Amino acid sequence: MKICKVSVILIVLASLTSCAHMHPHPMDMTQAIQNAKTPADHEALAKHYEATAREMQSKAQEYKKLLEKYDANAPHYGRQAQNLQSHTEALIHLHEQAAKANMDMADSHRKMAAEIK
């Protein structure tokens, strides 16, 4: 029983650390947004937001695969199976929301770039 609890804790910690940003943000987004005046500036911001959206969608896919493993092996996790599944579902939802928000920002900056031209 203790081995099961320890393994569940390690899995949850691994999931949480994968959510943490390992790299500092390459650009000061507040400054970049405030300084965006040309179509090229807004296009660069749009590309950045699209890349971030793809990254968030990729992470959501990773969590979907993990959820499939939890579903397939639920008896091995005992009572913690539902907690692991619901936690993973929440992570999937959050990453999908982040992907959508970033795509919306990319669309906004593309519109701004088009208006400036």
Image (spheres, helix red, strand yellow):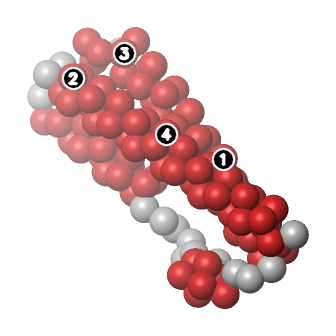
Q: Position of residue 9 (x, y in %)?
A: 24, 44
| Residue 71, label in figure | 3
Vertical arrangement, residue 24 with respect to residue 78, above or below: below
Viewed as shown, does residue 53 lie left or right of 16? right
Which residue matches tag 2? 82
Q: Residue 71: which quarter of the image?
A: top left
Three-letter amino acid code of the residue under disc 1: Arg
Q: Is residue 74 above or below residue 50?
A: above
| Upstream in sequence: badge 4 or badge 3 | 3
Q: Which residue is mark 4?
A: 96
How far is mark 1 from mark 4, CA to CA? 10 Å
Quarter occupied by the N terminus:
top left
Residue 92 visible at all:
yes
- When asked about the image quadrant of residue 92, the answer is top left
- For marks 2 and 4, give the CA distance: 21 Å
Question: Is the C-beta separation of discs 2 and 4 under 8 Å?
Answer: no
CA separation in Å, label 3 and label 2: 9 Å
| Alpha carbon separation for disc pair 4 and 3 | 20 Å
User: What residue does disc 1 label?
Assistant: 54
Q: Secondary structure at mark 2?
A: helix
Say which quadrant the C terminus sits in: bottom right
In this orientation, which residue lies closer to the viewer: 64 or 41?
Answer: 41
Point 78% across, 65% down: residue: 115
Query: Does the image show residue 55?
Result: no
Quick one: SS at disc 4?
helix
Which dot, 4 or 3, sits closer to the camera? 4
Label 2, label 1: how many angstroms apart (C-alpha)?
28 Å
Q: Amino acid at mark 2?
A: Gln
- Disc with the residue nearer the chain's start (1 vs 3): 1
